[in-house]
Image (spheres, rainbow, N blue to C red):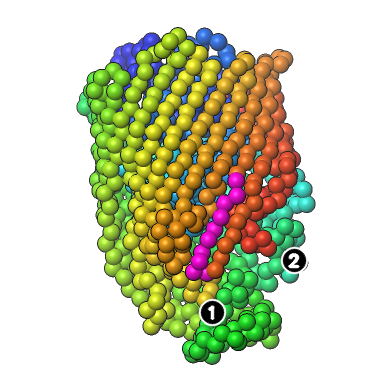
Amino acid sequence: AGAQDELDALFQDDSALEDRADSADDNSGTAQPADRGQSGTSSASEEAVTPSIDLGEEKTPRVPLRLPKNAAKLEEIVVTAQKRAQPLYEVPMSVSAFSGDALEDMGADNLSDIAAATPGFTVSESGPGVQNLQIRGISSTFGKATVGYQLDNISLTSFADTQPDAATFDLASVEILRGPQGTLYGEGSMGGTVKLLTKKPDFAGWEFLGQGGYFLTDGGDASTEANFALNVPVTDDQAARLVLGYGDIGGFIDQEEMNRPNDNYNKKLNGRLRYLWEPSQEWSASFMVLAGAIDAGSSNAADENYTQRDKAPVGIDDASQAYSLDLNRSFGWADVLFTNSYFTRELTATFDAREGTVDSFSLEAIGRAVLGMTLPAIGPVEGPLQDLATETIDGIPTVIADANDSFVSELRLNSVGLEKAFWTAGLYLKKQEETVRVAGTINTVEGADIVLADTENFSDSTVTSIFGQFEYDWTPWLNMAIGARYFREKLNVDITGEVYAQSTDSQDRLNFSAFTPRLTLSLRGPEDLWGFVDHMLGYVTYSQGFRSGGANTRIEGDDSVTPTYRPDTLNSYEIGGKLIFWDRLLTLESAVFYTDWRDVQVIAQEQGSQLLTSIANAGNTHGLGVDWIITLAPLEGLQLIHSGAYIDTEYVTTTDDKFAGDPVDAVPPLQYSFAAAYSRPVFGGWNMMARADYNFQDVSEYTSRTQGIFRKSDPIRMANVRIGLEGDRWQFYAYGRNLLDNEGLLAPSTPDRAPRARPPHYGVQLNYHFQ
């Protein structure tokens, strides 16, 4: 009866969702398309969605938040950005949300595709499983990640440049939270957080989804993909959902020296099983297991002719598994979530380090590597010796292997039933062990092998946190939210091995702590203001984010290397607003922000090889930016979407590696996208859809004065087109991607070895849906 009352209230006033406490695991509140006849695009305000409401024995039927007055208007999105279900226009932060159907209509199957349609979010991918995520100019190519990354309640966050791939098929939604999220999401969420939310198993009936695709790449091999999802109702209160995926993605980059054409192929397998048990309206338990494996021939970095010149075997192997158990209990005063997860991943990258290493060889380094002794630096002979090394060294086969195991447990409480207030409180524990092994060997033309580096970095980390957030409606139009998180880490680091025939053995016992507050004041305008403003929200936010510190690999007796580095912190000040006009025909969202990033972790010293670098806290940056999203539905079935971001961020202090005025690494100052999506019935119950996207990303830079490196990317212009016929069970799509043939540098790198986009490729996709 209580659930039915809630349902009735939703039809009368969708603000009733504000009082519904929900865990982030409960995807009844995530974005879902209300009508496939509407275009499936979504960003901060553009996706047509229909959340489901738990009705006990009625078993989650789909119901609209509000009865539509016309077919062209845009519907609400419900997100879990604040770890409870809320309509997006009521969330006082900058968020982009994409439902599973939106991802399908976009043809997005990875984070790079999602980033292209998300303001202020960029993904630099040098190969499968080797990604660097950055939001709002908080970018780092070394150290730990600056963006939080999670699947449901499982943390996937890794090092800055090795964030893993994640399958997007059959997801409920993806949410991109811009701005520091240290209070609710913890360490690493400095620039923001990326949330992937899986679909809940459905008790109501069987469901099968099948998807098969085939595409051709200009100058590359053909590719095939297949995905399946099966929903199985086990009993009236138990159900399971199984997802399987396979991809054989053809390469387009040649290994010239080893005579291996199209060598950057990518074979991937993934699977996910989620089991849900809801014995009553008060209790629920969810168990999930997932696994993935990637076998790639090489990276996507090449010269302008899509050629690599490695002389040693290359490849990427990435294997991961995860397990999670979530227990929910609803009391009269709070909803309680107890979640436990285990994530393990082994990433091995094999490459030839000859190109970057030989150029950095000094007389001292060559003496260590070849003679096992230190020679004095003699400037006039350095150049000839490097030329000799270039002629003598045939290759430097190198392996970087990262094995990571982490266990996370969180207890979270969300208040229920308070009229003007809402609170969230939680305890967090994470134990992690990680081993990073670097092994490089110099192969000479005479056949002799010389060990360049062989090190093992083992770290054992224990993190404990306590966090909370309290919200209160002072008046019907004024809301205040205040929150904080206390973080403490005990980190043990043991490094063994040798570099240039010298020992790197060291032990460090470190303790880090951080306190990250958040304060938000938001103003809500009255409904139907002036007869054409449906909803109006303005907010002012101060928030803080951070990432933890660590220890460097250093050569014994070399006091110039900084042994350890501290956490760096980010202070962010943001003013934003959201407006919905004319019965949801037009939505506007924008935010202006200022960031103060302190004790930035940067490269402190190059140790004679691209294999090893040291990190230190040096320098502060300031950034000023704005992001925006505009969505218009002028005609029935037509949506026009424009989003973008402008960021001006630079160092304001001078260090060995950065000078005041140097830009933050790999941050494009300007990024924007345009999309047009059209959908309408055609004949016999079939629906026709068409979508075109254009994305632009400005030039970004990378500066390392320690290494004498000054690099730039190329401007990136991408255009994609997708058309399709959609029936109740069958859907057929044809598409073309990178139609402008963008072949420039996607990231600031050397032109002869820079990440490149897949050349123009054209494909077809067939879906089958039975329910």
The residue lying furthest to the left in this view is 333
In magenta segment, residue 386 = no
Within 10 Å of disc 1 (Cα), the crowding (few <14, some 14-19, many 20+) is many
- Quarter of the figure with residue 383: bottom right
Within 10 Å of disc 2 (Cα), the crowding (few <14, some 14-19, many 20+) is some
Task: Give SS at disc 2.
Answer: loop
- Residue at 26 percent across and 35 percent down: it is 482
Q: Looking at the image, which is closer to me, 387 or 281?
A: 387
Task: Give SS at disc 1.
Answer: strand
- Quarter of the figure with residue 598: bottom left
Q: Earlier in the sequence, mark 1 or mark 2?
A: 2
Query: Residue 682: x percent and y percent?
Result: 71, 16
- Residue at 47 percent across and 31 percent down: it is 590
**Could you tell me if the residues under marks 1 and 2 are in contact, i.e. CB atoms within 8 Å?**
no
Q: Quadrant of the C terminus?
A: top right
Q: Which residues are magenta?
A: 698-707
Residue 464, compared with residue 658, is above or below; it is above
Amino acid found under the numbered disc labelled 2: Glu
Query: Residue 93: x percent and y percent?
Result: 39, 33
Majority secondary structure of magenta residues: loop
Q: Is residue 457 visible?
A: no
In magenta segment, residue 705 = yes
Which residue is under mark 1? 452
Amino acid found under the numbered disc labelled 1: Leu
Q: Quadrant of the N terminus?
A: top left
Task: Decide if residue 170 is on the left or right side of residue 28.
Answer: right
- Quarter of the figure with residue 511: bottom left
Q: Which mark is residue 256?
A: 2
Q: Is residue 752 visible?
A: yes
- Residue at 31 percent across and 33 percent down: it is 520
Query: Residue 69: x percent and y percent?
Result: 52, 9
